[in-house]
Amino acid sequence: MNENKKLQKPWIVQKFIGDKKFYQRVLFLAVPIMIQNGITNFVSLLDNIMIGQIGTVQMSGASIVNQLIFVYFLCIFGAVSGAGIFTAQYYGKQDMEGIQYTFRFKLLISTLLTVLAIVLFCSAGDHLITLYLSGEGKASDAAAILRYGGEYLSIILFGLPAFMLGQAYASTLRECGETMLPMKAGLAAVFVNLTFNYLLIFGKFGFPQLGVEGAAIATVLSRYVEAAIIVVWTHLHKKENPYIVGLYRSFYIPAGVMKNIIIKGTPLLFNEGLWASGVAMLTQCYSVRGLSVVASLNIANTINNVFNVVFIALGDSVAIIVGQLLGAGEMEEARDTDTKMIAFSVCSCVLIGGLMLLFAPLFPMLYNTSNEVRQLATEIIMVSALFMPQSAFLHAAYFTLRSGGKTFITFLFDSASIWCVSVPVVYVLSRFTGLSMIMIYVAYYLTETFKAILGFVLVKKGIWLQNIVKE
């Protein structure tokens, strides 16, 4: 009896800390995603620095377009993720036919969104870029940013179909436990992007010097390389991916499955689109404080994205692992696993945030820009680092709710929060107060604290413990 008491772990260890097998499983999924996203974001950083060497206005033009394209990216992410909730649970019960249905849905909805995006950006691209040029600054700089942004956008649109197809395939592979291949494809794309950035931005080794247009061409090429690797590998490895056999014989999706995916997935699609447009609106609010703020945010966000890969990958892992457990009907194991994964994500980001805080002053020095832009970028990075554990919890909580099909609640949790709380607060503070830009940025994160409290309550209640593919 006394020996058993000695061997028994404290309750806090049992609740929040897993065993070796648990962390091996989590890291097996998360590390390839971290590596892929990390290298992709690191190349985006180098891309930014390369464009920044040409000039601040060129960098700002490209960054504004990337902010707009980010809305499209998250719409695609929302579209494939809505069906992906079912993919993970179908895989948990080894229903290959069900995976085919979700795969077809992803292809159809992503194609529709891509066509709509191209039409929108072709018809209203310049107007959308102009929304970010209303702050203080030289009129000539604003005109140059608009010109370079337009050039960048006109080329980057050619890469959207490849991005859409790659995401449909890669998301299905991940939801079925295959994270290595998307990582390898991402690494190849990164190599292509980095190589052609260098060759085409600066005109090296006989290539033309194209500046921001060269950066856009390199990005488009990398999108097609990544998609080609993923698609070809999936179809050549039918044994590992049995759901691919007969995938294109028809695009039949049973009415019941279609209805369930639309009911569960539509809120997720709208959520990603509205959340991304909310982030774009926040950036627009900050931009009224001057063109230098646009440049500072571009630098800071690029750096932040490199560090954020940790909690993003762990959040993706929550969706996959917990989703599979729910599909297999293992409710208690799903709850226990989820608690430990959230704790792991938050604790990891305490360390990552500390490193980010320590090195924050060094990153902006890599850019050829003014001291004012560098100083503001440093302060923005430091604020993001301080709030990184909160961001990690929010991301994991979001994916927890989503794994059980609670997509309408995630819609309220994410989009309603940013549009009803964060955007109004930042809009008022940026336009009607004398607060500094950095204090307004802090205020945004404080609005996120309210969402973190709500997320804690929803996760603890266990409303997400649902098997949505049960016969």
Image (cartoon, grey):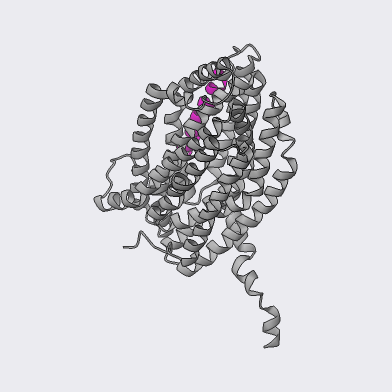
State the residue in front, 342 or 365.
Answer: 365
User: What range of the chain is rendered magenta?
Assistant: 213-234
Q: Position of residue 38 (x, y in %)?
A: 62, 40
The residue sitting at 35% across, 59% down in the picture is 469
- Examine the structure image and report whether residue 229 is included in the region drawn in magenta: yes
Q: What is the count of numbered marks?
A: 0
Q: Nearer the viewer, residue 421 or 418?
A: 421
Query: Is the stretch drawn in magenta largely helix, strand or loop?
Result: helix
- 91 lies above or below 206: below
Residue 204 x/y as whole percent: 65, 15
Residue 290 magenta: no
Image side of residue 301 versus residue 279, left or right: right
In this view of the protein, can residue 320 be seen by the observer?
A: no
Residue 317 horizontal/vertical position (percent): 53, 53
Q: Quadrant of the N terminus?
A: bottom right
- Which residue is located at x 63 percent, y 65 percent? 17
Asked if 370 appears above or below 326 in the picture, the reply is: above
Q: Residue furthest left?
A: 255
Residue placed most toward the observer, 327 or 390: 390
Residue furthest to the bottom = 1
Q: Is residue 100 left or right of residue 5?
A: left
Position of residue 85 in the picture relative to residue 138 (left or right) = left
Question: Dividing the picture into quarters, in which one does residue 200 lie?
Answer: top right
Residue plotted at (44% across, 44% down): 419
Residue closer to the observer: 310 or 412: 412
Q: Which corner quadrant of the image does residue 145 belong to? A: top right
